[in-house]
């Protein structure tokens, strides 16, 4: 089980993502985003060395808020052959320098996401040590799960992962975080 440290991270996750998001092809904003944490969950690394987080963030800078899902891995050393997947580095107050990767490009995250969809591993609460996240629901399917980058309240999939996040008005909404596609 991963340990959640109550410490500082420099730059913060939101600061790191504010610089990275505008460069992504699925970013819908125009200019610098203004991000707020909206929700998410964690998965465990079986070896206990890598943090795996599915972070939902809402950009309120534009005329309409947009919520993005940014799965990330936090590693204590660079991931070989993955420089183009690097979101950036942070200094963690307990663990030191961490390399933060775009999760869908990290084999560990994709393997753990597939295990979640199969029902082999549980989703953990994003902020509470040892707590599972009961808002994360899975439906198994044949194929590999693909991340939904722009979250839409009420979206579903016959197979995949749905979860809750907080809308800009403060209400809880649910939608697809990952969809299993055949092939």
Image (spheres, rainbow, N blue to C red):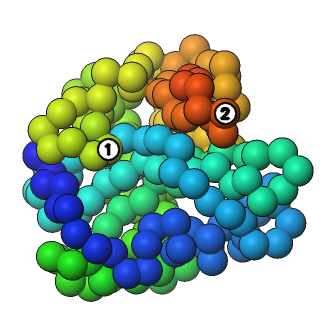
Q: Quadrant of residue 48?
A: bottom left
Q: Image point 30% across, 29% down: which residue?
A: 133
Residue count near mark 2 (Cα–Cα under 10 Å), binned few <14, some 14–19, many ≥20: few
Residue at the (20%, 62%) spot, across then down? 6
Q: CA distance from mark 2 to mark 1?
A: 21 Å
Vertical comparison of 21 with 114: above or below: below
Numbered disc 1: secondary structure = loop
Pick whichever of labels 2 and 1 is earlier in the sequence.
1
Using the rendered image of the protein, determine whether residue 110 is visible from the camera's viewpoint.
Answer: yes
Residue 169: mark in rendering: 2
Q: Position of residue 38 (x, y in %)?
A: 53, 44
Image point 43% across, 47% down: which residue? Answer: 54
State the image coordinates of residue 180 (x, y, percent, origin top left): 54, 29
> Is mark 2 in CB contact (under 8 Å) with mark 1?
no
Asked which secondary structure carries label 2, the reply is loop
77 sits to left or right of 56? left
The residue labelled by disc 1 is 126
């Amino acid at each position: 089980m991963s340990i959640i440290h109550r410490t500082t991270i420099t730059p913060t996750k939101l600061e790191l993502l504010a610089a990275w998001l505008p460069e992504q092809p699925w970013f819908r904003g125009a200019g610098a985003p203004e991000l707020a944490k909206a929700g998410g969950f964690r998965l465990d690394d079986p070896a206990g060395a890598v943090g795996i987080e599915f972070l939902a963030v809402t950009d309120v800078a534009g005329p309409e808020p947009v919520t993005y899902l940014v799965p990330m891995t936090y590693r204590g050393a660079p991931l070989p052959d993955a420089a183009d997947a690097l979101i950036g580095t942070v200094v963690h107050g307990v663990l030191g320098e961490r390399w933060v990767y775009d999760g869908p490009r990290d084999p560990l995250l994709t393997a753990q996401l597939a295990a979640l969809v199969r029902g082999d591993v549980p989703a953990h609460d994003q902020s509470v040590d040892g707590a599972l996240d009961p808002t994360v629901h899975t439906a198994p399917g044949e194929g590999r799960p693909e991340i939904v980058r722009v979250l839409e309240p009420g979206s579903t999939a016959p197979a995949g992962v749905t979860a809750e996040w907080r809308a800009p008005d403060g209400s809880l909404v649910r939608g697809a975080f990952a969809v299993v596609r055949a092939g």
